[in-house]
Amino acid sequence: YRFFGEPVVEACVENGASCIDISGEPQFLEGMYLKYNEKAAEKGVYVIGSCGFDSIPADMGVLYTRDKLKGTLTAVESFLTVKSGPEGSCILDGTWKSAVYGLADQDNLRKLRKKIGYAPVPVVGAKLKRRGLVFYNQEFKEYSIPFMGSDVSVVKRSQRYLHSKLQETPVQYGAYVNIGGLGSVIKLMFAGILFVLLVKFSFGRKLLTKYPEFFSAGRFTKEGPTHKQMDGTSFTMTFFGEGYSEGQDPQSGKPNVKICTEVKGPEPGYVATPIAMVQAALSLLEDEACLPKQGGVYSPGAAFSKTKLIHRLNKRGVEFSVIRKPEV
């Protein structure tokens, strides 16, 4: 999307057509907001980014968790687990290239955000603590690391919109991915150090994009997954939410209620993503009365919070459920 996405957005806005995308690149998503939000509003069209695995499960999962908590949800952490069958799993190298160019261009993303001038999102309730780069997760009995995708930035944009435009209580969010045992940690640390060193230099980026399979330990390939690999792969995103029970003031005292929810579905990149994309498009077409009153460039949670998108996803195999009901 960094190289090829903008002409599509520009053409849609200029010609009065709404559009969605499946980008997981914060710089592209937020750049389109800066350049086309006002024009889209004038035309009355909706430009809704990140409508694939990045970041509908995370963004809508936070809203689902909020709606299932009896009280005020103030913080959520999500943990992604991807399971593969005997054939293993891999991802096409387009996602790898997005990560390479995105990490190399962090300075410009910071400048972009400064130019946009986002209003700060207030912290309600106890502040959510950031976890370490690698930590052992007692809940899952395996190691976890921060999720490096667009989920956190997308959810934050949704929460900012819902707070500023609809006066809803903003939810703090942290995203993590479960990676397995100590052997996985060692392999990942080695690959991560190599990635960070190489991505800073032009020749390093060329190496990373030319040999994705080698530098990602087989996770990313130029061929992508086989049908057997896709059939044997699934994901689960588990959300741990905390907040305040009805009648309890979030501004005083510690959170006194917890909830656990889950979004699960088929292989993320090539099965769950088109499901999410198509159902988002149907919501855009059929739930028009529930969309924001004004056109513009939106994140999924901002655009679809009042629609039937979660219901549609449930019917198509991306399932939202409560694992542990709210406990005071």
Image (tube, helix red, strand yellow):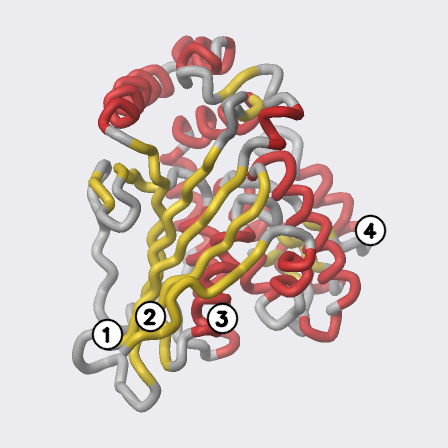
Report the front residue among 50 and 4.
50
At 50% from the left and 66% from the top, the residue drawn is: 64
Judged from the image, the secondary structure of the residue bearing numbered disc 1 is loop
Q: In this rendering, is residue 306 above or below 82?
A: below
At 72% from the left and 62% from the top, the residue drawn is: 283
Report the disc number at residue 162.
3
Q: Quadrant of residue 192?
A: top left
N-terminal label among 2 and 3: 2
N-terminal label among 3 and 1: 3
Amino acid type of the residue tagged 1 in the rendering:
Pro
N-terminal label among 2 and 1: 2
Look at mark 4 in the image and give the residue it sits on: 15
Q: Are marks 4 and 1 in contact (CB under 8 Å)?
A: no
Look at mark 1 in the image and give the residue it sits on: 255
At 40% from the left and 14% from the top, the residue drawn is: 215
Report the front residue among 171 and 5.
171
Using residue 188 as the reference point, say whether residue 40 is left or right of it: right
Residue 16's spot in the image, x, y percent? 80, 56
Q: Quadrant of residue 268?
A: top right
Using residue 161 as the reference point, say whether residue 75 is left or right of it: left
Q: Quick one: label 2, few (<14), some, or many (20+) residues within 10 Å?
A: many
Q: Are marks 2 and 1 in contact (CB under 8 Å)?
A: yes
Look at mark 2 in the image and give the residue it sits on: 74
Q: Is residue 31 visible?
A: no
Q: Quick one: label 4, few (<14), some, or many (20+) residues within 10 Å?
A: few
Of badges 2 and 1, nearer the viewer stands: 1
Label 2, label 3: how far apart the Cα atoms are: 13 Å
Label 4, label 3: how far apart the Cα atoms are: 28 Å
Amino acid type of the residue tagged 2 in the rendering:
Thr
Residue 37's spot in the image, x, y percent? 62, 57
Label 2, label 1: how far apart the Cα atoms are: 8 Å
